[in-house]
Image: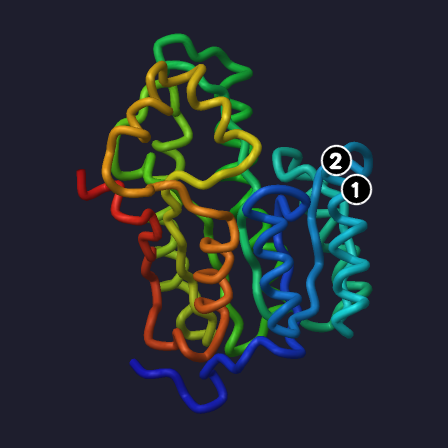
Amino acid sequence: MELSENQVPKNIKGKTAIVTGGSRGIGAAIVKELIDDGCNVIINHRRNVGKGAAQVKQLIKYAEEKGVHACNVLGDLSVRRDVEKMFKNLQNDFQQIDHLILNAGQTPFKEFQEFNKEDWKILLNTNLIGNVGCVQGVLPMMQEGGSIVFITSTGSRRVMPHYPMGVIKAALEHLVRYLDFELHSKGIRVNGVCGGLVKTDTFEQLEQVWPGFMQMLEIRKRDFVLDPSEIASVVSFLCSDKSRAIQGSVILADRGITLE
């Protein structure tokens, strides 16, 4: 079944996107990329204090300088009531949201045999239940031609010690397929970006979780470390009409680290 002319996604200039976890790292890079492309952006983050909140203010100011609209919306994806309240408020302020970028994530760094009840809550509530809640919340505001993009990681494809998030990321990659199948009749595309090693705040913690990690990178002949802007560029592409043939897919953006 092909998309009708009305269902074909348009360029993202002048459109509106919401980015979860948009205050730091990959999320902030995605917000900046969309602003550069002329897209209005709603920046979701959990707390209105600290470095993340300061970064959001800078991004909103940057959007003003670029002549597009940006605003922030507080909401903890791990709390169902927060998600419901967030989208209820958005429905009062926005008639339409064209793109949903699901970037927020949270995980304990430990083995499954050490998991307790609280660890399961952290792993499931934000990354799976919260993301599905965001999809349900945005659909009343998303019209034909809209798109949803999940951010996953290569932990979905290879075992990374003390990284239970990999299992959830694998689940999200399958969720991409199921949601695209469900939402195709509405003209909404669902895709994902599977990122490799991205230089964010948590990157430096990897040496503690995986001893010898940095040394391993240094002796290999390929530079595997991505800048967050590289993931952001792929997200922007998936939101644009240039990617209209890509539906229910997860694009691997890892600089070839899964080749070895």
236 vs 256: above or below: below
Instruction: Name which residue lies at 31% across and 26% down.
Output: 160
The percent coordinates of residue 197 (x first, y second) are 39, 39
Residue 248 found in image quarter: bottom left
Q: Which mark is residue 51?
A: 2
Q: Of 204 and 78, which appears nearest the observer?
A: 204
89 vs 213: above or below: below
Instruction: Give the left or right position of residue 26, taking residue 254 as reference.
Output: right
Instruction: Name which residue lies at 70% across and 53% down.
Output: 43
The percent coordinates of residue 2 (x first, y second) are 32, 83
Q: Secondary structure at mark 2?
A: helix
Residue 139 found in image quarter: bottom right
Q: Which residue is mark 1?
A: 54
Residue at the top extreme? 114
Residue 260 found in image quarter: top left
Instruction: Name which residue lies at 33% across and 42% down.
Output: 223
Confirm or deny contact between disc 2 and disc 1 (CB under 8 A).
yes
